Image (cartoon, helix red, strand yellow):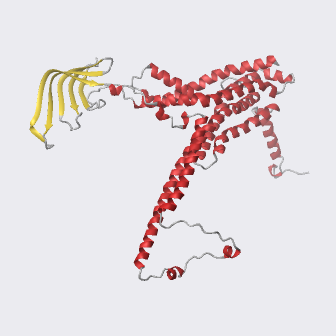
């Protein structure tokens, strides 16, 4: 049996490592395509791209492990069945459950690793990756002055160039508006030609202008423009230096991103859920206390009458008793004022209760999100084991290795898991389903598939062989042909 165990483990580990790398690479390319426009033209450097790829490769591992386990198990046992090795093992009297045992133990170890990874490495990678991605997205595009278009990326200036020569430095027809004082187009520089270059390691941009004029229109003390304060300066050569500090990528404090559930481990998520529950309880208690203290018409506790006469007594729907009890007399104006005050306070109380309900709903959603994310660390780990049951059973049944049938089946079950996960998360976060039902539903459904396929594999069922379905179809055709209404009208019935 040791040789069989070694054979199974070797046949499983190779495809597992290969498929894990392939799946992580596919998800990484999806990330690159999703944020491609945010990377173009920003001169980020290889170190930034390297960090992004490392962080997001780690982020994709939890979702990649179930798919890679499914693919590897399908390929492993499909190859064993295709080359009749699995048949030989079964003919020696070894049950399929014993053949699956070493790979099942390995898959269980992958589930334990996935749980540790989801709780330890994944929150750290999410924090590092998404904070760096935010800084990349907020970084300005590198300097790119185009012909005939006002360039406004330099704070306080608008620059227009009529012609830009192929060397990228020589310019023709330069117009620069200085908007640093926020007074409009009152400071304009026009030049016949010029040169553009950077200095001090791209820290400053220099416009060296030739044969130009600078126009400045100053305001008078009363805020109006005065023609006597218009200044015109001509020059043969002039240099204008602009700081490019705003073009560099500035790192944001990572603590600003720690509030999100993706950046927390199980302990922190439990603390968040407990804090939300305590806040909701305090909010509700304070609402009742405030309502009983701030309003003139106090809540009074009356003893509940549980007698039979009280239960059988019909409620008063309407009548003249109100008018009889509140007869208008000398103090009728005070009665009207009391009514208005009561109605006003009742409306205020209703508005306050509505606001409190919205606050409680918002806090409850935060608590549900924390619980969903906490349970996902367990469900994604358990999904590795469930996917192994499905993959190993199907591989033993279909007896096809390679990347053909296994890839097709893997994608089908992975899409099913993803759709069920999105559906369960949506209903759980909207408080339509209980959290446990929403997050565990995908694994429960796939576990049913896995147990059914394992039962079929144990009984050597031929689910994916066409000849067995041809037999059933022929039997069905024969049955319907023997029916009386299929016989010709002129047939003689003996």
Count all numbered tags in the image, as a single digit. 0
Q: In this view, does 336 lie to the left or right of 386?
A: left
The answer to whether residue 299 shows anywhere in this view is yes
Residue that lies at the very extreme toward the left in this rendered image: 228
Residue drawn at x 22%, y 32% is 178
Q: Estimate the x, y position of residue 134 in percent, counting from the top left.
A: 45, 31
Q: Quadrant of residue 443?
A: top right
Relative to 118, is 238 above or below?
above
Q: Estimate the x, y position of residue 169 in percent, counting from the top left.
A: 26, 19
Relative to 357, is 374 above or below?
above
Q: Is residue 264 left or right of residue 472?
A: left
Q: In which quarter of the image is residue 367?
A: top right
> Which quarter of the rendering shows the N terminus?
top right
Q: Estimate the x, y position of residue 285 in percent, counting from the top left.
A: 55, 54
Q: Is residue 171 left or right of residue 245?
A: left
Q: Estimate the x, y position of residue 130 in percent, counting from the top left.
A: 49, 31
Residue drawn at x 77%, y 36% is 469
Front-most of 298 and 53? Answer: 298
The answer to whether residue 422 shows anywhere in this view is no
Q: In which quarter of the image is residue 321?
A: bottom right
Residue that lies at the very extreme toward the right in this rendered image: 494
């Amino acid at each position: 049996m040791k040789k069989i165990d070694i054979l199974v483990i070797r046949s499983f580990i190779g495809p597992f490592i290969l498929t894990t790398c392939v799946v992580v690479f596919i998800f990484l390319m999806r990330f690159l395509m999703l944020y491609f426009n945010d990377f173009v033209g920003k001169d980020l450097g290889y170190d930034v791209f390297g960090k992004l790829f490392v962080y997001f490769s780690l982020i994709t591992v939890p979702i990649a492990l179930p798919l890679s386990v499914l693919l590897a198990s399908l390929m492993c046992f499909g190859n064993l069945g295709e080359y009749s090795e699995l048949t030989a093992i079964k003919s020696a009297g070894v049950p399929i459950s014993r053949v699956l045992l070493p790979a099942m133990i390995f898959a269980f170890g992958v589930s334990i690793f996935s749980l540790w990874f989801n709780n330890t490495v994944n929150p750290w990678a999410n924090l590092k990756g998404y904070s760096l991605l935010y800084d990349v997205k907020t970084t300005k595009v590198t300097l790119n002055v185009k012909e005939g278009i006002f360039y406004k990326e330099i704070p306080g200036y608008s620059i227009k160039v009529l012609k830009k020569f192929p060397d990228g430095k020589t310019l023709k027809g330069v117009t620069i508006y200085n908007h640093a004082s926020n007074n409009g187009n009152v400071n304009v520089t026009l030049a016949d030609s010029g040169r553009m270059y950077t200095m001090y390691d791209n820290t400053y941009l220099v416009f060296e202008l030739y044969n130009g004029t600078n126009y400045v229109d100053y305001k008078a003390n009363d805020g109006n423009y005065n023609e006597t304060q218009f200044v015109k300066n001509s020059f043969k050569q002039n240099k204008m230096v602009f700081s490019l500090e705003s073009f560099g990528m500035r790192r944001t404090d990572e603590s600003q991103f720690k509030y999100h559930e993706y950046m927390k481990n199980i302990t922190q998520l439990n603390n968040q859920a407990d804090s939300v529950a305590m806040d909701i309880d305090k909010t509700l208690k304070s609402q009742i206390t405030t309502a009983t203290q701030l309003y003139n018409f106090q809540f009074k506790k009356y003893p509940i009458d549980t007698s039979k006469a009280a239960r059988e007594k019909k409620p008063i729907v309407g009548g003249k008793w109100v008018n009889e009890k509140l007869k208008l007399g000398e103090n009728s104006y005070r009665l009207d004022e009391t009514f208005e005050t009561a109605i006003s306070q009742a409306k205020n109380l209703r508005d306050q209760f509505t606001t409190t309900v919205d606050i409680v709903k918002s806090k409850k959603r935060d608590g549900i999100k924390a619980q969903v994310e906490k349970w996902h660390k367990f469900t994604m780990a358990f999904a590795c084991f469930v996917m192994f049951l499905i993959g190993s059973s199907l591989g033993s049944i279909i007896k096809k290795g390679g990347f053909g049938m296994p890839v097709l089946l893997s994608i089908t079950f992975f899409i099913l898991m993803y759709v069920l996960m999105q559906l369960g998360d949506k209903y759980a976060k909207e408080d339509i389903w209980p959290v446990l039902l929403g997050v565990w539903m995908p694994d429960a459904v796939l576990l049913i598939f896995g147990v059914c396929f394992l039962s079929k594999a144990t009984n050597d069922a031929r689910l994916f062989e066409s000849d067995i379905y041809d037999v059933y179809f022929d039997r069905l055709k024969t049955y319907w042909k023997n029916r009386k209404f299929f016989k010709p009208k002129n047939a003689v019935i003996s």
